[in-house]
Image: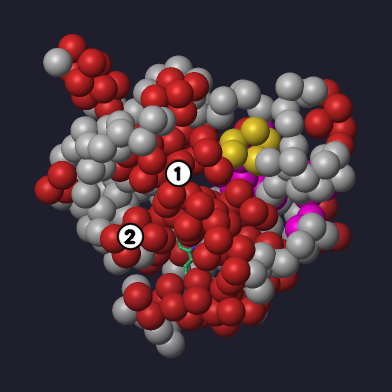
Amino acid sequence: MMTSNQPKHEHTNVCPFAVESSVDPHVFCPPQEGDSRSPCPALNALANHGYLPRNGQQITNKMLYNSICEVYQISGPVAYLLSYGGLLKLGKGGDYISLHDLARKEKLEHRASLFHADASIDSDYAPVVVDKVLTEETLSYSKDGVLFTMEDAAIARAKRQASYPPDQQISANQAFIARGEITILLNVFNNPNPELLAEHPEIHSSNGENGPLPGVPLDLIRTWVVEGRLPEGWKPYHTFTLWDLLKGTWNLKSGMDRISAELPGYGSGKSHGTRGLLEGGNTAGGISGVEEVVEDKKRK
Ligand code: HEM
């Protein structure tokens, strides 16, 4: 897969897994100096495990397609949309890319991410380093402090988007992409886990104890997003289909629309009685600006 003119991903001294990596080609190894990484946790993890070139360079749409099908069990049509469609939108349809190309500002990359800070005004690229404070703010919307559910994600996304003035909102297309990212996360990592449900009787799963969890464990999200690592022992439990994507993004949008009605500057301003939803979140830190706006509304 690698060619001689590619910068090497050295496993000398710094990589503690040098020995194992010769046995298991997919052992985790964090990026080394000079490796290219993206704002996408899914693809960074694939490179850190050697499903994509570990140096994050000379990647084709076919490599993206094959690796997301293999590792995350994404169905053909969705994988095609993400990989071939993604690179087309980046203006790199048939080209080799490096993972860092995906950080090109406002191409595929967008503002109002849940785990990454926005690109600065004077930069053409968004940061690829995870913003740990923002990530914890996002996860703090978990109502039970154990799982991140669709409802938690709807609150997190609605609040994140509402923290921008009306004239700086992300486009409808970017908002769809952002909902898609979270929908895939929520559907790929919510593996059935009867032990976890037994430990947390307060969590009610309408899927039964052997069905998929009603959300994704927070620690699993931290491992994947912050460390760029596939969770230990995790394997996909189903194929993520186009229908899953459409249903999930629709549900997320419905949740966001209900919530946004409570957030001035984002929604229509009409209340649909979701005050309970808003207040129910475990919003330890709050996402910049929104809390003040909500407080301001209460004072009026
Ligand atoms: C299984 C497949 C995938 C999953 C689960 C996934 C998931 C995610 C998630 C959760 C984010 C949000 C990061 C954040 O909010 O900070 C994200 C961001 C991103 N993903 Fe992926 N992704 C997948 C495949 C892809 C592919 C194939 C591409 C490119 C062709 C891609 C490009 C991006 C880019 C550019 C971003 C940055 C968006 C931004 O926050 O500005 N992803 N992805």
Q: Residues within 10 Å of mark 1 (few under 14, many from 20)?
A: many
Find disc 2 in the rendering and name its residue. Answer: 174
Q: Which mark is residue 145?
A: none
Left or right, residue 210 beside residue 180: right
Identify which residue is drawn at 66% across, 65% down. Answer: 240
- Residue drawn at point x = 48 percent, y = 50 percent: 252
Residue 202 position in % (x across, y down): 73, 22
In the image, which residues are magenta?
219-236
From mark 2 to mark 1, how far is it between C-alphas? 17 Å
Is 223 in the magenta?
yes
Crowd around label 2: few <14 · some 14–19 · many ≥20 (10 Å): some
Q: Is residue 44 left or right of residue 297?
A: right
Residue displayed at 81% across by 47% down: 211
**CB at disc 2 and ligand 1 closer than 8 Å:** no
Q: Which numbered dot is residue 255?
A: 1
Image quadrant of residue 53? bottom right
Residue 200 is situated, as x and y percent measured from the top left of the image, at: 78, 23
Amino acid type, residue under disc 1 in the picture: Gly
Q: Quadrant of the N terminus?
A: bottom right
As helix, strand or loop, the secondary structure at mark 2 comes to helix
Mark 2 or 1, closer to the camera: 1
Residues at discs 2 and 1 in contact (Cβ within 8 Å): no
Vertical order, 152 against 198 (above or below): below
